[in-house]
């Protein structure tokens, strides 16, 4: 667990109220104090990453999708919107408490970094990066010096810092840059990156290049995975190594002298085609480290088998099978584009089958069938105490429209659900309502629910939410960032 120091606020921030449109939420259910969840441990803190829970899209470098911070507490839930005319899949927070959002504008699609005001979510300043592929630059992380680490379209590794001058004005600038063009072919792009425990930055490209970079020495090393294997999601690191899931298999790698080395490879059932609601032909998972003793004994992904989706759990030490369990059965939605939530012995899988993405990456291929209703679904699976297999705990039809986050502080899963315009149907429309919800991880039932926004301008597009030190829930949408708080 990371500790957040007091926020450094020594001057008045410039107002940006014009960016915000406030909506008061009608709260359903009763807010009450909740005992901390009996889940844990989470993966160990990476000394080269920012605070656990907010340093990466999936919380930590192990991609557990957990946070040690409590979400919005008792009181009326209220939401405001920072309108950025951009899709904002990555909203992170450093140890100084300042949120940093990596967004792609609707017009021009040039990735842009925004520094947000912790008090109201408004944009304090921004910085444009070099344009790359659709997924290139989506994944980033906050390092131990509160800098955003990202690879841009020039095939360069950047560390973007936020700085304040003597008059209190903020700026974003590239503090350090290292070209990766020596190992990344032209036309390829980094899709995922994370630091290891030696301070190197691991990266993986859409074309299947996996590498390490040391931007203090300028050293870059890489290997290319077998032909035809693409990396469409981010990567995860633990003391045992780096996990990468391609469109065919999951790998654990380490580095020898900076050059990646494969420790094990586990193929999975990738099915006969890409499914609707997935962005690639294969697993939609960023691999998740979890475990009951160290927080990293296991690695979890979800496969892409034709008739069902299966949670695959492997032992980190050697890649041996722990279990393969059908998930999302109740929702009849055999697919997940989201990283599983993993903590202790428990894994939570959210379904995305049929989710209507407005675009898919180049080379993703046609989906089979061409379209489907959004099925949703949320499933909990536990590894048995003796590690000999797994058991299904619960399985429901909840339609999460974001990557759920489990708070070990308040004992709840936090996400946004997409309700059908016509109750009782599975279809989606441009006028669908979205709700912020808190879910009991023991039962899978919603314990608190509040209508957030309505309409396609607020589509959360299966992006990950982040809980801030102040207890605000920040959720990227196709046009900016929602900020949900309790008043």
Image (cartoon, helix red, strand yellow):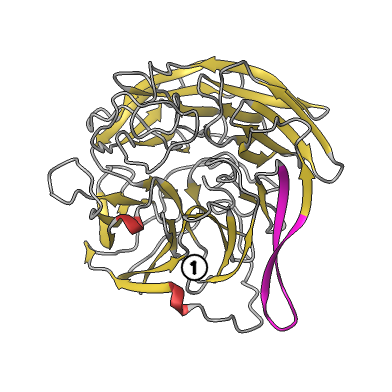
Q: From this view, report whether residue 268 is shown above or below residue 35.
A: above
Q: Residue furthest front?
A: 108
Counting from the top left corner in percent of width and height, residue 438 is at: 32, 54
**Does the image show residue 98?**
yes
Q: Quadrant of the C terminus?
A: bottom left
Counting from the top left corner in percent of width and height, residue 29 is at: 21, 61
Left or right, residue 387 beside residue 260: left
**Does the image show residue 290?**
no
Left or right, residue 153 beside residue 419: right
Instruction: Report the label total.
Output: 1
Left or right, residue 428 beside residue 459: left
Crowd tier of the residue under label 1, counting other residues whose Cα lies within 10 Å: few below 14, some 14–19, many 20 or above? some
Q: Tell me the magenta residue range.
A: 156-175
Counting from the top left corner in percent of width and height, residue 151 is at: 67, 44
Counting from the top left corner in percent of width and height, residue 476 is at: 44, 56
The answer to which quarter of the image holds residue 157 is: top right
Q: From this view, report whether residue 263 is shown above or below residue 149.
A: above
> Magenta-highlighted stretch: main secondary structure?
strand
Q: Is 396 within the magenta?
A: no
| Nearest to the observer: residue 420 or residue 383 | 420
> Residue at 40% of width from left, 56% of height from top?
410
Q: Residue furthest right?
A: 217
| Nearest to the observer: residue 465 or residue 85 | 85
Q: Is 168 within the magenta?
A: yes
Give the secondary structure at mark 1.
loop
> Residue at 57% of width from left, 40% of height from top?
133
Residue occupied by mark 1: 470
| Nearest to the observer: residue 440 or residue 399 | 399
């Amino acid at each position: 667990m990371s500790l957040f120091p007091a926020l450094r606020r020594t001057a008045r921030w410039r107002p940006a109220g014009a960016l915000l449109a406030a909506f008061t939420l009608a709260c359903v259910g009763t807010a009450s104090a909740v005992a901390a969840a009996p889940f844990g441990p989470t993966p160990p803190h990476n000394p080269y990453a920012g605070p656990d829970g907010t340093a990466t899209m999936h919380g930590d470098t192990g991609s557990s999708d957990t946070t040690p911070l409590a979400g919005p507490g008792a009181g009326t839930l209220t939401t405001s919107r920072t309108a950025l005319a951009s899709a904002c899949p990555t909203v992170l927070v450093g140890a100084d408490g300042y949120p940093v959002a990596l967004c792609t504008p609707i017009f021009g699609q040039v990735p842009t970094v925004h520094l947000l005001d912790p008090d109201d979510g408004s944009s304090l300043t921004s910085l444009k990066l070099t344009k790359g592929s659709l997924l290139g630059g989506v994944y980033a992380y906050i390092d131990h010096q509160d800098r955003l680490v990202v690879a841009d379209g020039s095939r360069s590794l950047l560390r973007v810092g936020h700085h304040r001058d003597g008059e209190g004005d903020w700026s974003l600038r590239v503090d350090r840059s290292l070209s990766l063009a020596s190992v990344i072919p032209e036309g390829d792009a980094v899709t995922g990156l994370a630091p290891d425990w030696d301070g190197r930055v691991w990266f993986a490209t859409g074309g299947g290049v996996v590498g390490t970079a040391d931007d203090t020495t300028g050293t870059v090393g890489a290997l290319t995975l077998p032909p035809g294997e693409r990396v469409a999601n981010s990567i995860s690191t633990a003391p045992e190594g780096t996990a990468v899931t391609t469109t065919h298999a999951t790998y654990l790698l380490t580095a020898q002298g900076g050059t990646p080395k494969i420790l094990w490879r586990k193929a999975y059932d990738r099915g006969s085609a890409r499914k609707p609601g997935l962005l690639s032909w294969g697993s939609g998972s960023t691999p998740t480290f979890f475990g009951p003793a160290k927080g990293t004994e296991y690695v979890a992904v979800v496969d892409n088998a034709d008739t069902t989706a299966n949670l695959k759990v492997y032992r980190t030490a050697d890649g041996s099978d722990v279990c393969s369990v059908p998930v999302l059965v109740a929702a009849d939605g055999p697919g997940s584009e989201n990283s599983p939530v993993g903590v202790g012995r428990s894994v939570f899988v959210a379904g995305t089958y049929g989710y209507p993405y407005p675009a898919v990456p180049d080379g993703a291929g046609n989906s089979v069938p061409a379209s489907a209703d959004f099925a949703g679904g949320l499933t909990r699976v536990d590894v048995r105490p003796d590690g000999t297999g797994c058991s299904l705990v619960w399985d429901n039809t909840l339609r999460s429209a974001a990557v759920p986050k489990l708070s070990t502080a308040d004992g709840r899963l936090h996400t946004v659900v997409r309700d059908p315009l016509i109750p009782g149907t599975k279809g989606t429309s441009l006028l669908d309502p979205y709700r912020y919800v808190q879910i009991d991880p023991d039962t899978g039932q919603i314990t608190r629910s509040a209508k957030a926004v309505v309409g396609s301008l607020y589509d959360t597009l299966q992006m990950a939410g982040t809980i801030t030190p102040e207890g605000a829930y920040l959720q990227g949408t196709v046009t900016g960032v929602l900020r949900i708080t309790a008043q």
